[in-house]
Amino acid sequence: MELQSRVNDLREKGLGLAAISYDAPEILAAFSKQRGITFPLLSDAGSATIEKYGILNPVPEWATGPDKDDPVVQAEVQKYVSVVRANPSMVGIAFPGTFILDRQGKVTSRFFENFYIERNTVASLMMRLGNLKTPIAGTKISTGQLDIITYPSDPAIAPGNRFSLALVVTPHSGIHVYAPGASNYRVIALKIEPQPFLRVLPMKYPASEIYFFKPLNERVAVYDKPFTMVQEVVLEGTPQAQAAFRGKESVMLTGALEYQACDDKICFNPASVPLSWTLSLRPLVVERPTRPQ
């Protein structure tokens, strides 16, 4: 359903879209009609293609076999199949993931999740691939050393969504801030306030440059040109999380951008810029395709 909402955006970027599952053609056709899906839903009955891509999920078979009562197998079911017991109809499912292919069919990127109910949003994937254009108006903040624009990848999210927060940081002329690898200085970092059912993933920083500080004869990793930080966040989709978010219209994230800025003569005091993002909540669609009557 989230993919359907972004079909036009993907086409504008020159991307086609198709989803593949082990469901029979008549089941997928009925689901497409019911939910207004306009992109291809491809049937891999027998899971031959799923297996060739190396993403066949073996857990349902374990969970319906002689080891079904093994605590290790039961834990795998909870993580990779369902919060309830698996059944034989689940044998053949894929691990959830996204492949991006070029026009020659070569895989250029792939993204996977660690929990069966979690999914990357399309906008978050595009943001992580460097496509930062978004219809969402950013929040602009200026300090004595930096200009900051921040915005989320998506205006609305559902439990189980893996989304992103972008921070476009522009140091003022002659200013630099410290990047990972710089010792004895405060490295720029985004701190998100913890809250239940919100998981903040490790930050992946852009490449930095080496700055030579002549008075101390030291070389340190810095950012002195505009750069973008992308922070991935997961709104958990467990039954407990779904219950906690039920009836709520939005979720707010708060945090701060911490950094220390310097010019070629002095270093300014460490700074902390408060930030917040409010995203609408939409319901999680858990309905599976069913065989038409």
Image (spheres, rainbow, N blue to C red):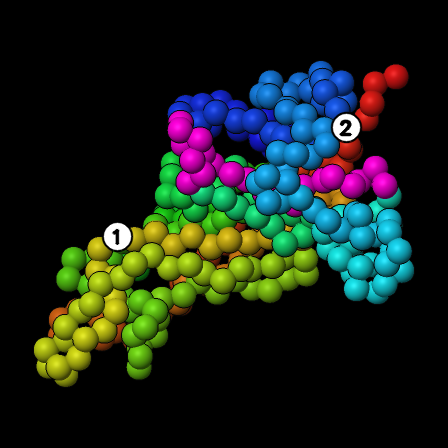
Q: What stretch is highlighted in magenta?
A: 88-108
Q: What residue type is labelled 1?
A: Pro
Q: From the viewer's perspective, tell me whether residue 283 is left or right of residue 38.
A: right
Q: Is residue 119 visible?
A: no
Which mark, residue 218? none
Q: Nearer the viewer, mark 1 or mark 2?
A: 2
* Residue type beneath disc 2: Pro
Mark 2 secondary-structure assignment = loop
Q: Is residue 99 magenta?
A: yes
Query: In the image as oriented, which residue stretches furthest toward the left?
Result: 214
Q: Quadrant of the N terminus?
A: top right
> Residue drawn 72% across and 32% down?
46
Q: What element carries label 1?
A: loop
- Where is residue 137, by image quadrant? top left
Instruction: Give the x, y percent position of residue 77.
Output: 78, 54
Residue 52's x, y, as percent? 59, 39
Cα–Cα gap, marks 1 and 2: 46 Å
Report crowding for label 1: few under 14, some 14 to 19, many 20 or more residues within 10 A (C-alpha).
few
Residue holding disc 1: 226
Residue at image mark 2: 289
